[in-house]
Amino acid sequence: MTVSIASDHAGYELKEAIKNYLDINGVMFADFGTNSAESVDYPVFAKKVCVSVQTGESAAGILICGTGIGMSIAANKHRGIRAACCADTYSAKMARLHNDANVITLGSRVTGTGLAIEIVKKFLSVDFEGGRHSERVGMYDSL
Ligand code: RB5
């Protein structure tokens, strides 16, 4: 499984910490930047990760900004992308189980590094439940 990851300047440090976690745990990833704390526009980076998920190059995406909100709004503009902004592990689990989320967004100014890593761990380890949720998730694209 390859995961794509990106952040803006606010999320840069947390991105590096999450990359370290992925590395240590043998999860392959593609880093789409940004590569410093210099100010950038988060929609640009959201797009890079979303295209990677849309094309199947990555199975899932991780996007980080200050709150996680801008990244989730930008990501959810992309067809087929189901981005969930999560600040707790329960939401991360449910985002996979019921919503088949394929992108998680995190807020570096909201969530500490340790919890953010636990959230990513949960997100990457839970499968979509399917069943009654499949039809509902399928409805997203016709909205
Ligand atoms: C950048 O200051 C901040 O606005 C951005 O990281 C993000 O929180 C937007 O939603």
Image (spheres, grey):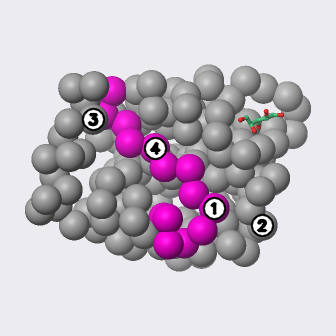
Q: Secondary structure at mark 3?
A: helix
Residue at 61% x, 36% y is 71
Residue at 46% x, 60% y is 28
First in residue order: circle 1 vs circle 3: 1
> At label 3, which amino acid type do we have?
Tyr
Q: Hey, which quadrant is residue 22 in on the image?
A: bottom right
How many residues crowd around disc 2 within 10 Å: few (fewer than 14), some, or many (20 or more)? few
Q: Is residue 27 visible?
A: no
How many residues crowd around disc 4 within 10 Å: few (fewer than 14), some, or many (20 or more)? many
Gap in angstroms between the C-alphas marked 2 and 1: 9 Å
First in residue order: circle 4 vs circle 3: 4
List the residue tagged with mark 3: 140
List the residue tagged with mark 2: 112
Q: What x and y, as percent, mark residue 30?
A: 52, 47
List the residue tagged with mark 1: 87
- From the viewer's perspective, tell me whether residue 37 is left or right of residue 73: right
In the rendered image, residue 85 lying in the magenta stretch gets the answer yes
Gap in angstroms between the C-alphas marked 4 and 2: 20 Å
First in residue order: circle 3 vs circle 2: 2
Most foreground residue, 1 or 71: 71
Q: Is residue 104 above or below residue 8?
A: below
Q: Quadrant of the N terminus?
A: bottom left
Gap in angstroms between the C-alphas marked 4 and 3: 12 Å
What's the mark number on residue 3? Answer: none
Q: Is residue 138 visible?
A: yes
List the residue tagged with mark 4: 83
How many residues crowd around disc 1 within 10 Å: few (fewer than 14), some, or many (20 or more)? many
